Structure formats: structure tokens, C-alpha cells
Image: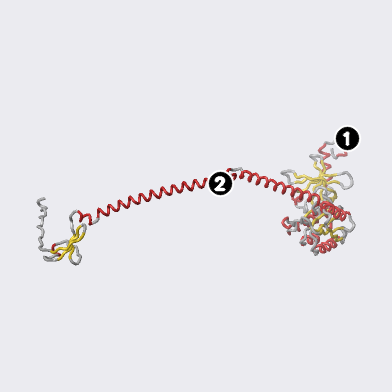
Amino acid sequence: MSSLRDATAESPAPVRAVANAISQYIDRLGTVWVEGQIAQFSRRPGLNTVFITLRDTVADLSISVTCARTLFDGLNPPLVEGASVVIHAKPSFYAGRGSLALHAREIRMVGLGELLARIERRRQLLAAEGLFAPELKRRLPFLPRQIGLITAPGSDAERDVIENARRRWPAVRVRVAAARMQGANCAREVMEALDVLERDAETDVIVIARGGGSIEDLLPFSDEAVIRAVAKVRTPVVSAIGHEADQPLLDLVADVRASTPTDAARRIVPDFAEEQARVSQARERVRAALRRTVEREQAALTALRSRPAMADPRTLIDARLDEVASLRERARRSLRHRLDRAHDEIHHQAARAAALSPLATLRRGYAVLQSEGGHVVTSLGELAAGAAISVRVADGRLSATVDSLHPATPVAEPDESDA
């Protein structure tokens, strides 16, 4: 068969021929710029290709798009579902599956997607400077003396903040610094109002409040100048911009983010009824604790009074009197015992002294001779015939004169050889 046009019912073309022909025709189309919305995307493990479903923004049509993982991951900000994009791609027909897809070579954010991309890049730069660091967040005062409110005059946000704050704490004061909450002059007026409230010494907290709106309406609250101005103030700032789903950059730099203006009032001002109830509960707890303490001490006092010693204090004195008498008797016995031992010791020592005394020797018939000078005579060589001497006996002295001297006969000592 020369071409698909020659195919007939009797001689049909095979599927592969039709698929190859379609693939060749689509390959000749070249590249194309296509605009759409990201419906979904998926990364499959082990593949370097990301599969994207691109949906038409008007008609209910979609087409598959493939792109390299490096291209997809290199997008800043990251691609998210719902983003509007323009893709430079080449159509391709996969004959094996019989499916048509676009192979992306370049992806650009457009419209809202481009706006979100700019905001995301700004967020990354400011975050890198540390403006959103958690340690920079300041705590809100328990009960502010005055609330500074930046909002559009006469707006629902102003009414919600003031009414809910006064409903929770009737005596609270609110100073409103009017500023446009959208438009070209919004960022400038918000910064001017912020400066006015920052210079007011009575203002303890500042609320920037606005109702919901489109991303374009909330764009001033992602303005870099506004973010830096909020980061510089010393007064705590509460961001109450839009609804729960809205998150301008002001929410990241503010000390507290409130989902709505009503939520901002709830976070800033304590509820008077709740605090009054807490005070009542605290008083009751103090009373109960004091009552338990008094009852415990009373029980302890009653237990002490019920003891015998407290019932009749004289029992303590009687017991101590008996103890003193016992100790006194023990002291007497100990003293007598010591005196008896000392007396016996004295007699014993006196007996020993008497036994060792020279008088005892004299009583046995011995005498002590002394010369006239009082020198004790121990040898005949110390005296001469006719010398006067004094004789000491056991009961006194007597005077005598030496008539003659008779030396004693020496006793022969034994010879060692005889031994």
C-alpha cells in the first residue's frame, strides 16, 4: 500500500501504519506556545520526567504535558496546582499508547501565577534576611491600655474589631488610624498610620485589619516597604488581613496572625466574664486551701493536747524529778566508791613509805653515826680517837666520844682457781 488513502474495506491499513503516520505528521508541527492552568502533576519514582495535566481556563479540555525533572524543580517559585502558566512545548504522539502529549521546553508563570511567583520570590528574600524569624516575635500584653487599629474608616473590619474588643472588655480603649486598605496609596497610608501609632506611648498593640478580597486587593500587604516598616516597630503587631485562606507577607512578619478581624479582637483582649470566673475560681481554691490548712493544724493541735504530757504537764516534771534523784544517788555512790578507793590507796602508800623509811631500820637496832659537822660516818677512816659524834637511834639522838677504833678483819674472797 503506497499511502493511507489507498486503504479500502477489503485492504485496510494496519494500526501501526495509522499511528506512525499520525506521529510523523505531528512531528512536523514544530514547537508551540500554549497557555493553560495546572490541573495536577505527578513525579514517578525512578523517572526523570514529570507528568502534568494542563487544563483550558474556559473550555472543559485538558492535555498531558511532560517535562524534565530538572526543568520542573528549577522553577522559582515552585509550580503549584491551579497556577496559570505559558508553556513552550513540542507536540508528540506516542504510537505505542496512541496518546498525544506536549513535551515542555520552558514554563513561565502568567497572570495570577506570575503575581504569586513575584510574592514568593519576595518572601524568600525577606526570609533569608531573617525578618520572619520566630525569635523576633513579641508577646502580646495581657490587657493593653490602648489598641491601635489601622483600617479603612467606617469599614466592617473596624466595626468587628471595636465591637468584639469592647464586648470582651468594656473598658478597653481603641485608637483608629485611618488608611486605605487597597489601591495605589494603600501601602503608603498604612506605613504613615503605623508610624503615628508607634509614636503614641499609650498604644500597647497595633492591629492592621481588613476584610477579604482578591489577591490583587491584598497585594499592598505583601509590599516590601510595608513588611520592613512592620519589622522595625517596637510595638507588637497583629495582622488581620482577609480570611483564613489568605496569607499576605504581612502575616509572616507580624507578631501574631489573626484569621479575621474578629479573631484579632479575641486574641488581643481577654474576656471579662472568663477572667472574672477565673478570679472566682482562684478565690475558691485559696479558701479551700486555707480551710484545709486550718483543719490540718487544728487536728494536729487536738492530737497534741490529747497526749498525757499535755493533759497533765506535771507528769513531765515528776519523771524528771525521779530521774534527777536517781542521778544524784548514782553520783553519791560513785563519789563514795572513789573516796574509799582513794583512802585504801593512801593507806597502802603510807605502809609502803613506812616500810621503806630509815626509821624502820633504826627500830630494828641500827643507828646512824654523824660527825660534828652532821656528816654521816660510813668508815673508820672518817673518825679519830676522842672525836665527838652524834648517834641517831629510832626514838632520838645521843652524843658520844670515840674512845678507840677497831678496824674489822677483812674477809678473804674466794679464789677463782679454787672454784
- Quick one: label 2 or label 1, which is nearer the N terminus? 1
* Residue sitting farthest toward the bottom: 373
* Residue sitting farthest toward the top: 10
Left or right for 299, reference 339: right
Instruction: State whether residue 88 is above or below residue 177.
Output: above
**What amino acid does circle 2 point to?**
Arg
Residue 314, numbered circle: 2
Q: Nearer the viewer, residue 290 or 44?
A: 290
Residue 2: quadrant of the picture: top right
Q: Is residue 111 visible?
A: no
Q: Position of residue 105 (x, y in %)?
A: 79, 51
**What amino acid does circle 1 point to?**
Thr
Of helix, strand and loop, which one carries label 1? loop
Q: Position of residue 106 (x, y in %)?
A: 80, 52
Residue found at x 70% / y 48%: 290
Q: Position of residue 416 (x, y in %)?
A: 11, 53
User: What distance separates the C-alpha of mark 2 from that of mark 1?
Assistant: 136 Å
Left or right for 260, reference 341: right
Structural crowding at the residue carrying mark 1, measured as other residues with C-alpha within 10 Å and reported as few (<14), some (14–19) or many (≥20): few
Q: Quadrant of the N terminus?
A: top right
Of helix, strand and loop, which one carries label 2? helix
Left or right for 339, reference 71: left
Left or right for 242, reference 296: right
Colour mapping used in the image: secondary structure
Q: Is residue 170 visible?
A: yes
Residue found at x 75% / y 52%: 74
Q: Nearer the viewer, residue 215 or 42?
A: 215
> Label 1: which residue?
8
